[in-house]
Amino acid sequence: DQQVKQNSPSLSVQEGRISILNCDYTNSMFDYFLWYKKYPAEGPTFLISISSIKDKNEDGRFTVFLNKSAKHLSLHIVPSQPGDSAVYFCAASAGNFNKFYFGSGTKLNVKP
Amino acid sequence: DTGVSQDPRHKITKRGQNVTFRCDPISEHNRLYWYRQTLGQGPEFLTYFQNEAQLEKSRLLSDRFSAERPKGSFSTLEIQRTEQGDSAMYLCASSSRSGANVLTFGAGSRLTVL
């Protein structure tokens, strides 16, 4: 039962443009959401997070938006850079952080 | 601090053999997680330790899988009688008491079962 879904396996954008990665979830108990970035042969690295009490969190070029009524979150990268090319996973947790659920990932390719 | 360390990075074994993976978390992290990732999928939760106590365990963890964290520091994940379906990347992650909301992952141990 996939509780966190990333329906776009891949995304290609031009350098300097905006990248928008989307994530949907089904469990209304989720109250904390994260985005991870993964390069080949490395483990996922934390990028940005958001608590359910907020609808937006910004960190430099990265902004995460949360729409609780739609059970949807998105990651915006502006401007996109070739070094951003990686697989991006969204993840969610409920309450005590004993368990995190991950989506299947979106492979972002930023073209120079 | 060298981050989360996993060993071995790659293990090739024959079906039916037992394998063991080791994870050394960041030293001050009391929380430790094991995840499994197969091709084209995201990490799937296997188990969670808080200090030495195993507090969560996924249904994915069949009776052939066992994990330990005997002194609340490093952890081992053992797979007995491996099957080809066990081929995957096994990821370990840790987090601290104050930063429980963010996992730091190791590079993973890739298992190939022939």
Image: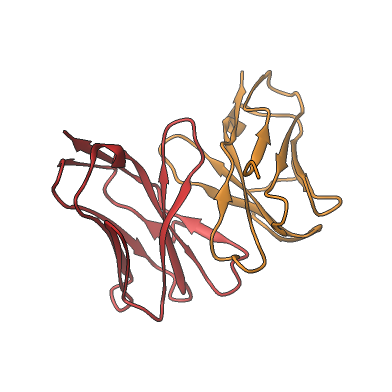
Chain colours: A red, B orange
Residue B78: x and y in percent read 76, 37
Q: Residue at 33%, 76% (x, y): give it.
A: A68
Q: Is residue B76 above or below residue A32?
A: above
Asked whether, in this view, residue A30 is left or right of residue B66, the answer is: left
Asked whether, in this view, residue B21 is left or right of residue A60, the answer is: right
Residue B60: x and y in percent read 62, 49
* Numbered label tally: 0
Q: Residue at 45%, 34% (x, y): give it.
A: B39
The one of B89 and A17 positioned closer to us in this rendering: A17
Question: Picture quarter containing residue A4?
Answer: bottom left
Asked whether, in this view, residue A112 is left or right of residue B94, the answer is: left
Question: Picture quarter containing residue A54?
Answer: bottom left
Q: Is residue B101 above or below residue B77?
A: below
Residue lying furthest bottom: A53
Q: Is residue A61 above or below residue A107?
A: below
Residue B88: x and y in percent read 56, 33
The one of B5 and A27 positioned closer to us in this rendering: B5
Q: Residue at 64%, 41% (x, y): give it.
A: B2
Q: Residue at 67%, 49% (x, y): give it.
A: B26
Residue B114: x and y in percent read 61, 18
The one of B19 and A55 positioned closer to us in this rendering: A55
